[in-house]
Amino acid sequence: MSSIDNISVNVPKDEQLTMEELGISRVPSSKQTKKPIELFFVWCAANIGILGVVYGAIIVSFGLSFFQSVLAAIVGVLSFSLVGMSSLAGKVGRTTTLTLSRSSFGKKGNIAPTAFCWINLMGWEAVNIITGTLTLVALFVALGFEETSIITALSLLLFGGLTVVVSILGQNTVLLLQKWITRTFGAMTLFVAIYLIATADWNSILALPSGSWITGFLPAVSIIAAGTGISWAIAGADYSRDQSPSSSSKHIFLTVVGGAALPLLLLILTGILLTAQIPDLGTNTNPIAAIGQLLPSWMAIPYLAAAVAGIVTIAVLSLYSASLNLLTMGIKLKQRTAIAVDAVLVLSIAVYVLFISGDFLGPFISFLMICGVFLSAWVAIFLVDFMKTHRYVGYSEHDLYGETGCYTRTLVCWLIGALSGLMVTKTGFIDGPLAVGVFESSSLGLFVSFTIALVLHVLVSKTNIRVIYG
């Protein structure tokens, strides 16, 4: 066979692989075909779970007025700008977020933040499994069943099994499902919000007294930011790495932020309105069941059913990104094997919370704040590295896949930033020794860790921008 014939029949291996099979390899140019609008549906579906309603209840529990609660929701959701920025890095680097992070920490140095991000995703996956189970329990109650341990166990089995099955279907199938679930649950949420607006006791809602901007407003913003933009920033590039080179950076950023903000703000507003009728919603052991009982059955049943479907796709996104993180750390497992390992871990956590501790919201808030200080420090470093070095000249193969060791200064910046935030954070589970005075109830640890890590990394990073090839 001639050399010309060889060229015509030998297709590069990566060109034949699916996105799942590519793992953390760079997406070949032939597969960079997606448009920004597809990211809108990804992030809309990822944030359209009923947990957003619980966020609204948590905000009000800080003793805020209606105006302060809505403002806290808006400011907190704006943290999704971080996901918009990591999505831009994905288009430039054509690989996953934590693989791109190697350019900041070195291949070996990146193992530490990647391991923590994997733990964070496992925690979020457990939250999704627990939320999905509680939603399914609420659906059974709406159908006339009594809430018992048997119903909870059956709901956990059904939801966990459904999540694993959908995960195995592949990313393209999940994205197709997301489009329809986003539209269905979004329309139902809008209908429920209109119903609540029409039936809400507005005199009571508007009469809510104003709370402290330091010890009420800031903690509420911190929790929303930790649970939305900061937590999802580690996955932004995972879903934008196959964006077309012609996709506008502005459009990518706006569709990512807009896709998340639209459902989140609607859901949080719904939670704020519900709290006027269920004052203890933010501390309820099963807030989702309380929501189901408030709505008329003809509305609650289809709404909760659609909510279950929505949480499944959110759970699948977490599992997918978590399995990619394992590959980034050098743990080579097949996609399905990685998903199976992750599923066993998160189901164990879910069993503990649902059947042993019996408390969901308390550990959930502590989890958000502890993870938040580490993730916010990582985000600061990642964004500095992208904006200063890679935004216009890209990422080299050596930066991402070479044996680059550990960039000690960057790792130290991350650790100092995270530990500084932890020192001034009080969660009840871990109370920092400096969480006194203004820090005692303000949850300023997120902002402290982000600021210190950013400033330190700017000071120690190289001032010149290297021209990168590849």
Image (spheres, rainbow, N blue to C red):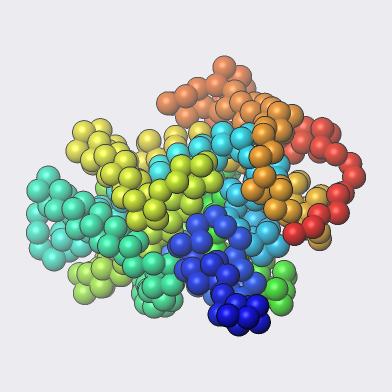
Nearer to the camera, 282 or 450? 450
412 relative to 116 in the view: left or right: right
Q: In the rendered view, does 156 fall on the left or right side of 262? A: left
Residue 285 place in picture, x, y as percent: 28, 43
Question: Closer to the camera, 170 or 305?
Answer: 170
Residue 332: where, in percent of width, then height?
45, 46
Residue at 77 percent across and 36 percent down: it is 457
Residue closest to the eye, 406 or 49: 406
Q: Is residue 184 above or below residue 217?
A: below
Q: Please identify the quarter of the rendering in which residue 165 is found.
A: bottom left
Residue at point 51%, 61% (across, down): 22
In the picture, which quadrant includes the N terminus? bottom right
Check the picture and name the quadrant holding the C terminus: bottom right
Task: State the residue lying farthest toward the front.
Answer: 1
Please indicate, yes or no, whether residue 289 appears anywhere in the rendered image.
no
Q: Is residue 186 above or below residue 324?
A: below
Give the residue at x 21% y 33%. 356
Question: Quadrant location of residue 105?
Answer: top right
Q: Is residue 107 visible?
A: yes
Q: Is residue 358 above or below residue 168?
A: above
Question: Which residue shows up at 85% across the image and 39% down it?
Answer: 462
Residue 88 locus on image (x, y percent): 68, 62
Q: Please, which residue is most extreme toward the right here?
A: 464
Q: Quadrant of residue 411?
A: top right
Considering every residue shown, the one lying at the far top of the view is 433
Q: How many marks?
A: 0
- x then y, percent, for residue 428: 44, 26
Looking at the image, residue 454 sits to the left or right of residue 141; the answer is right
